[in-house]
Image (cartoon, rainbow, N blue to C red):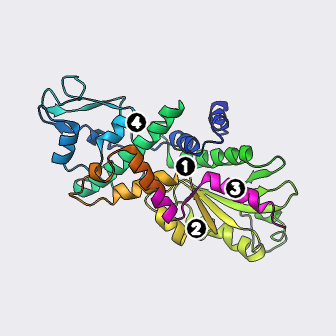
Amino acid sequence: MPLSDAQKCLIDEHLSDHEAISAVFMGLCWNESALAHWANIEVNPSETLAQSCERLDLGWNPNWLTEAGFTAYDSTGTELDDGANTAGPITWVPELRTCRLDDKVADSASGHGRRRRTSAELAVLAMWTNVVTTRGIDVPRPTDQSGGTRGALFRDLLIYFLERSLPDGWQVRHEVPLTHIRGLHMRRDVGDRKSDILIIDSGNRLIAALSSKWTWRSDRGTEAAQMVPLTRYRPDVPYAMATAEFPRAASVTRESIEDRTYHVCPGWAGAWMSVNELPAGALARDRWPDLTSLREEGISRAEALTLNGLEVLVSDLKNSGDIL
């Protein structure tokens, strides 16, 4: 299904703001999580959120959510400010909707596994919400979207983003038969395979081949089958990948067969990793007391891994066009 005018407009309006683009991609490709209700923690009478955080050994910091614009209420409907009026579960307004980012921890998980997954999802939700709120971005998040649909939408968003970001006269082509690429044509072992995305400059030069993978674990065999003839007959063409993988994000930069990899939201992935690795007994509130410290941690982690964003992909492609 082609992108709607509203989806295109979201990209057009925020083309030069890479964090906003991250929020648009993540929001439109939202993978609803079943664990958001674990943020409705049980508080004691007169207990503050900070005190509850310490007593319950939370791996996430309620301050992240309140800074992002969420408000906590006790079971009587009274806003939690100085302390709860009564014991019971809290509720958040607006309702918390976290994105499932880790396929390795089941919805039914308990103990430290549930702590890790819930905490990391809440961290990303807080950062995502902060961006859409401060920029005034209205992203309609789906409640039920299959993995195949999500992957196709990600690819189409990526193609449109590149079309709008690259110089006039450049082409971003999808599913081009490999036999239509010079050097691969008339090769008996190429077969009927197709490329994912090809970048062609205004001089009709093939600049790069790009693989779009919402998650890194998907279609690895298919991708390898595409790369073998390309690297054999056109070794001059770099092969890159754009992804939104979280649990395997660190592995992507080390083990991916592509020449370079790019992430939809590298800073958020870095923060996700740090929160996810927080050991039992360690409080996220002590490590990252606010969203600023969490965001800085994520950026630092992504830079250490050389996990670059889509804005770097655009820059690298433009620079490739200047190579003789």
| Residues at circles 4 and 3 in contact by the CB criterion of under 8 Å | no
Residue position for label 1: 148
Quadrant for the C terminus, please: bottom right
**Circle nearer the viewer, 3 or 1:** 3
- Magenta segment range? 300-323
Magenta stretch contains residue 317: yes
Residue position for label 3: 315
Residue position for label 2: 221
* Mark closer to the chain start, 3 or 2: 2
Label 4 and label 2: CA atoms lie apart by 40 Å
| Label 2 element class | helix
Label 1 and label 2: CA atoms lie apart by 16 Å
Residue drawn at (24%, 49%) of the image? 58
- Closest to the observer, 110 or 186: 110
| Label 3 element class | helix
Measured as percent of width and height from the top left, residue 71 is found at: 32, 30
**Hey, which quadrant is residue 301 in on the image?**
bottom left
Magenta stretch contains residue 118: no
Residue position for label 4: 68
Measured as percent of width and height from the top left, residue 22 is found at: 55, 45
**Circle nearer the viewer, 4 or 2:** 4
* Mark closer to the chain start, 4 or 3: 4
